[in-house]
Amino acid sequence: MASASDTRRSPAPPSSSPSVDSANVASLRALLTSAHEIYAGHPHSTTSNQLWSVLGSLDRMAARLVETGLVQSVSRDNRQGHHHYTPAAAVTTSAVLEAWLLGGCIAYSLGDMNRAIEWNVRILQVDPNYVEAMSNLAAAFRAQGRDADAEGWWTRAVHLRPAYWDAADHLFSLLCAQQRYADAAKVLNYVERHATSSTSPGVDLARYLAIIHAKGTLFYALEDHLAAAQAFSRVLAHAASGKSPTDDGADTNPLALQQLVDRIRTALQARYGSRLLLTPIEARACLHDVFGGELPGLRTVENSQQRNAIAQTTANTLLTLAKILQDAIAAGNGGSGNGGNKFLKQQPHEHQHADAAENVIGINNNAVSTSKTANLATLVQIMGRVPSTHDVLPMYYLSLALHASPSTANNIGILLASLAPALPIPHEHTLALEYYRFGLSLDPRHPHLYTNLGSLLKDQGRLADAVNMYECAVSCDPNFDIALANLANAVKDQGRVGDAIGYYRRAVAANPRFDEAVCGLANSLSSVCDWAGRGCTGYVETCGVDENSDIVTSKCEGWMMRIVEIVSGQLRSSLTWGTGVIANELPNIVREIVLACGYSSAADPRMKPWLEELARASESGVDEGAKIVEIFEAAARRARWRAYSDRYVHHLEPSSMKPFHRPRLPLSLALPPAPTVLPFHTFTIPFDAVQGREVCRRTALRVSVSTNRYSWLPADVYPPPPPPTEHLRIGYVSSDFNNHPLSHLMQSVFGLHRKSAGSEFPVYGICYATTPSDNSPYRQKIEREAHEFVDISGWSTQAVVERIVEDNIHILVNLNGFTRGARNEIFACRPAPLSISFMGFAGSLGAEWSDYILADRVAVPPDTVRQMRKADAQENKSRILRHHDCKNQDNWVYFEDIVFCKHSFFCCDHRQSAPDAVSSSASADPEDRWNAELVSRRKMRDELFPSLAPGTIILANFNQLYKIDPGVFLTWLRILSRLPNAVLWLLKFPDLGTAHLRSFATRWAGPEVANRIIFTDVASKDVHLLRCRIPDLVLDTPECNAHTTATDVIWAGTPILTFPRHRHKMCSRIAASVITSAADRAEDADRLIAQSEEEYEVTAVELCLNDGEELLQLRKRLFLSREKSPIFDTPRWTRDLEKTYWMMWNRWVDKGGAVTVEEDPDRNLYI
């Protein structure tokens, strides 16, 4: 509210005119002085009663003066000095109007809106153009909810006096609150155009710049980044040029943003070097380096309050502009700067960054979306060039120097943390920590700073410290959704699933549309079998649970349906990614292809299929971005093969070889959005084939685009290794060369490669460990037996890639895929000509940087491999893209070419490494071995379950509980109901899930059945392998099978009943693959692999009848055949793998340069 002490334009009364009532006027003036002091002290040193008393005094005193007749209407004639407006009347009228104005303010502060309105109306009856009264009247109307009246009076005030900033601010805020952003922008435009005529140099510059900044902030919120940047640039022009808005030409030639940024960069680089990595202390001092210690725009401003306001507005302008550029660069729309564009997290929803731009106007940031980033064309218009991180950092530094804002420190920390990998801890991350801590010194309760500090610590492996920071963020803001979700992720990693669920629930309650929190909550609930409210999709799955914990068998809303809907919407939206890029960038795209393929020009006839593919992609308007990436990957493959062929096949001289250009994606192709769900989570979410493959594909595309923009990648593709002479050089990359199922299964393979020397398919293996040693026997064995073992856990991506190139690796093996600890960016850099994935991730990586996947016909049915529509038709022979327009488009899954193994692709090292593996046991009498096994099994059974009655059938499942879904659990309960002498043995994996399973069992099958479910703790690996002998029958989980556990059970001789529920999910078919290779007789495999839910239940019951006699015979055959079963013959498996490597290599040498279907119609391999 504007009071009488506020500056206003009004006729000044004559200074020397005797008044007939000067005593009353003087008394009123004295009262006004006292009243202002009392009003200013409310509510701290002034009570409401004191204000009411002052209000009454003002009313009485003003009323006495009105009775004198000297309070006259301030008409136009009076303003022109006509005789009837006497000096005495002017003095009296001025004093009374000021009294009424202050009285209205006091009434407003006391909540008496009717009186506030009454007093301001009195003013306007006397002076219809009294702008302060108009604005105060509007404020009172808005407090009463009369927004239309408020808008009318504020609008009138702004038009009468554009430089009356209070009215402009309030009108702007009102329109924004009503989401009338176009009208709000018009108000600011009007004020900006007309305010300068009445603006005093220096005094009002602060408010004038604030108005322009408000306009820029509005356009930023409306995602009009160009208009926002233009407004912000005008603020900077005034602040950096020193010109007042009233100067002639002050706005006609504003200082370009590019010039300002270059000035800052030049000054800072002269002092600190090219990398511009300044500490907070150095950043605070950069104003002296750039402008000699003072903004030019402040040199004519003496008022300290105005100076501070101008500096803060300029700082906020720089902050928001820098954030516009930072967000665009992070999305892949800008240059990468030194060190490459590494804003991508491998798992982008592992934790969320919380960034901020300070806002000095009354706009509701939640009212409009700011999710979209500026595109390349807009960035060029803003900066005059494609901006890089080296443009953004100087802007942040100067902003911090002008105004020490925690938000600026926060955003600098985010930017620095994204410039380099988390490990080894680089200088950028050390500085990021300094900025986060500096920001917290400014505001110890800034939740965004705590959150981002926690995320950086988590990246560095300091999980406990990260949790502490997230907890601080939540204590500052209990409803901060990002901090809550990040805290949930972190405590889940600590094994505190129950706490994680609580934090996820709070995050979802705070923001129901926070997809990452919704999916995190759903995955956590699934991991402990807390299915209440899960719902049912009704198509991929046909059994779910409603809010009342009851079974539903048709579509039912719930959190599982919510996940499917979220991801489905994201996948649909992703089809528009990259639309229009080909049309806008065609000359550059064609040039990259021409250079990579070594063609003479775009007119080369060999360019025809490329140009046709580009035309189809552009015309379709669907999935254009993905098609561009696939086309560029095909061109890069051609370049790699040319480099090998020219050097080692045709033996060309270097001078005669064309460059083997690495094609670079257009900068206008933004970083693609990644699905909220991680590929690993697709194993237990009821996605169909298209949804499952697209989640992986979209995740892989993000890796492809991010990696392609690493600035340290050489201009040409990496030089290929020379042809193998003594052996083929194979590199294995994994985070799991420790006490992990991968090492349990493959520990002997790396040493067995040594035996390949002198064979038909010799292999030299090098293991690259991305995690440090846990000193387990598994790690020690692999380190000892592999040809070479390199611990790269502390290496940057660049160092790893260059080491692999230096090691002349022919084929790089991805043993992680999309599992925890994966470093897929290494594979996307293509340091080796070929790559293959197996054992780590049970599915397709959906990546152009993954050439093959190892599989078999059970795990990967051939009809789930892409099949080109009419591949032999002439119109398809020239196709380059093989992932589109397939005749099985709705069913195919695998982007990679498949290596189909004769036996199971799954490596099982039990014969070499299991605690009960005895090399001489196979030569002993089979009956003696069997009888000894029965005795040993009975003893272990009695020791573990001494209270079980003789003849009890032990059914079991040893999987983690996240693999159990309501449908299979209900089936198990029905099996138990039909087998009164059976128990079900499950693991506390985790312990929190046991109570939920008991509760559901009691509700769905009754307490008698529920009491026959037994839970035990998870045992060590060796003890677990021995315990696998105890059950009579293991019941597999159809949605996501037992994998390593299936091999453990089969090695023990225990029958496992599985149902490969989905053809499109490898994870649901691995147990069937293992059983097929393990069974000595085909009919045994048929018996243990059900083809439907019904057959699964019936078979389980039938096998347990007659005291389990059929089970016993199955067990005997499995146990006695394990010594000669292909599944446990690791030397045979390794020899087949070595043959596979050589087949891959020879095929690549022969056809690695093929890009069209006609050149290479079937790229699958068959062992």
Image (cartoon, rainbow, N blue to C red):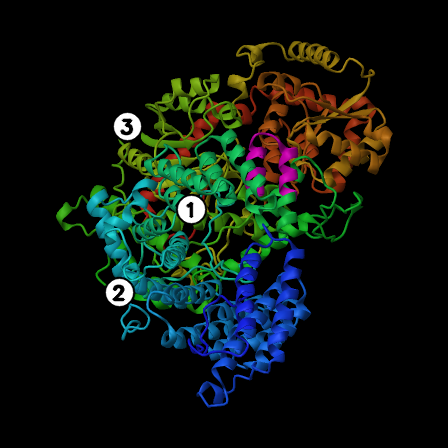
- Tell me which segment is drawn in magenta: 484-505
Label 1's element? Answer: loop
Is-magenta flag for residue 971? no
Please state the horizontal and vertical placement of residue 977, each as a whole percent of the image.
84, 32
Q: Which residue does the image show at 46% across and 21% down from the upper left?
A: 774
Please state the horizontal and vertical placement of residue 647, each as a whole percent of the image.
21, 43
Please state the horizontal and vertical placement of residue 886, each as a whole percent of the image.
51, 58
Structural crowding at the residue carrying mark 3, measured as other residues with C-alpha within 10 Å and reported as few (<14), some (14–19) or many (≥20): few
Circle 3 residue: 726
Q: Which residue does the image show at 40% across and 45% down from the upper left?
A: 409
| C-alpha separation, residue under disc 1 versus residue under disc 2 | 34 Å
Is-magenta flag for residue 492? yes
Q: Amino acid at mark 2?
A: Ala
- Image height of 228 relative to 530, above or below: below
Q: Is residue 158 visible?
A: yes
| C-alpha separation, residue under disc 3 versus residue under disc 2 | 41 Å
For marks 1 and 2, the one nearer the N-term is: 1
For marks 3 and 2, the one nearer the N-term is: 2
- Image height of 352 relative to 493, above or below: below
Q: Is residue 591 visible?
A: no
Q: Amino acid at mark 1?
A: Leu
- Image height of 330 relative to 423, above or below: below
Q: Nearer the viewer, residue 635 or 203?
A: 203
Q: Is residue 810 left or right of residue 993?
A: left
Circle 2 residue: 602
Structural crowding at the residue carrying mark 2, measured as other residues with C-alpha within 10 Å and reported as few (<14), some (14–19) or many (≥20): some
Depth-wise, is mark 3 or mark 1 nearer the camera?
1
Specify the quadrant of the image occupied by residue 81.
Answer: bottom left
Q: Amino acid at mark 3?
A: Glu
Q: Is residue 562 left or right of residue 667?
A: right
